[in-house]
Image: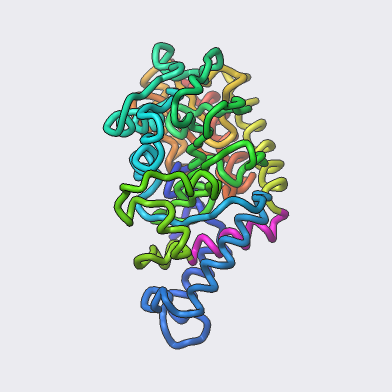
Amino acid sequence: MNTILKHNFSAGPSILPPEVLDGARKAVGDWLDQGLSILEVSHRTPEFRAVVDEAEELIRELMEIPSGYSILFIQGGASTQFSMIPFNFMGRTGKAAYLDAGFFSKRAIAEASHFGLVDVVASSADSNYTSIPSDYSIDPSCSYFHCTSNNTIEGSQMKSFPSSPIPLMCDMSSDILSRTIDVQQFDLIYAGAQKNMGPAGVTVVIAKDELLDNCSSKVPAMWDYRVFRDFHSLYNTPPVFSLYVMLLNLRWIKQQGGVKEMERRNNVKAEILYRELDSNPMFHPTIVREHRSMMNVRFSIDDPEMASLFYEIATREGMVGIKAPFGDGFRVSLYNALPLSSVEALVNTMRESHDAIKCSSF
């Protein structure tokens, strides 16, 4: 029986490098030749403490994070940060500024509203989030400003970030480690690991120590960033396996040439796919050109029957995770571990679909 090669375009949990999966399998069977699985080793052992130390060091190296920032590993996914940030920081003035550019920023706004006043500085909801708002000002009397660097569902991406008069918080869940950024521009960055860093279960938070020192004093321990910092992310049992697999993936990124090499590869993949979308009349990119994401590409097909035919052909060719999560259309994700060959296979499938429709009764 022939096995169809799978091309994994899922948005998260997303594709991981084969070398990382192989290392994870070995660790589940016998980690560090101890005769124990990584799944049953105490997080308080020196061996696992070394995992946390190395993961932190690699993130600091790969992102060129200067001193004065702490790196935290927190449970609950990036969505927990929607509440954790205002819980810790909104108390300074009782209000915070938010940019509404998509599904997850809208969720972050809804959670923040439980803790104080939310000033939505701009929104692209009226245009169905097909662009990133750019004409807005940030009220300096707010406690902080929150934005989302890449909108996983809509397929838009911030190409630059505002100069904020107040602490700048950013959700980078779907494009962290995919392109170079100036960490010093931000006061707090957070990202769920299940896009470019590793499997689901752990969220990375990069925060200025000065910011953390000014957290509200009335925050429960498991919601207090300072607790995670002071206990080296080991206040309670962390997501041990997720952290270990993330470490394997961070090693892989470094071995491949670091974030600059990831950015180069991702640009090549995105350029190839967008070129086909712009030239093939069957497909229509949904995001304005200047805000198109290099990580998550959204497009549509006008005719429902044509869309069904494309999906049928793509499925037959081993394409996985290409349907848009909400509404009509398609969304493919081009995360770090996705090989160029998968993008080339998708483009060939798009051309095959177009040719099949030309030869049919459509």
Q: Is residue 253 magenta?
A: yes
Quarter of the image where one finds residue 323: top left
As displayed, is residue 195 above or below residue 222? above
* Percent position of residue 334, x then y: 56, 40
Report the residue at 48% width, 44% height from top. Answer: 190
Name the one closer to the observer, 96 or 239.
96
Q: Is residue 276 magenta?
A: no
* Percent position of residue 114, x then y: 27, 32
Name the one closer to the observer, 91 or 122.
91
Report the residue at 59% width, 33% height from top. Answer: 294
Name the one closer to the observer, 120 or 138.
138
Q: For the stretch drawn in magenta, what is the main secondary structure?
A: helix
* Percent position of residue 220, x then y: 29, 52
Q: Is residue 354 left or right of residue 153?
A: right
Asked if residue 65 can be seen in this view, the reply is: yes
Region rendered in magenta: 244-257
Report the residue at 51% width, 40% height from top. Answer: 172
Quarter holding the N terminus is: bottom left
As displayed, is residue 179 above or below residue 235? above
Q: Is residue 30 left or right of residue 106?
A: right
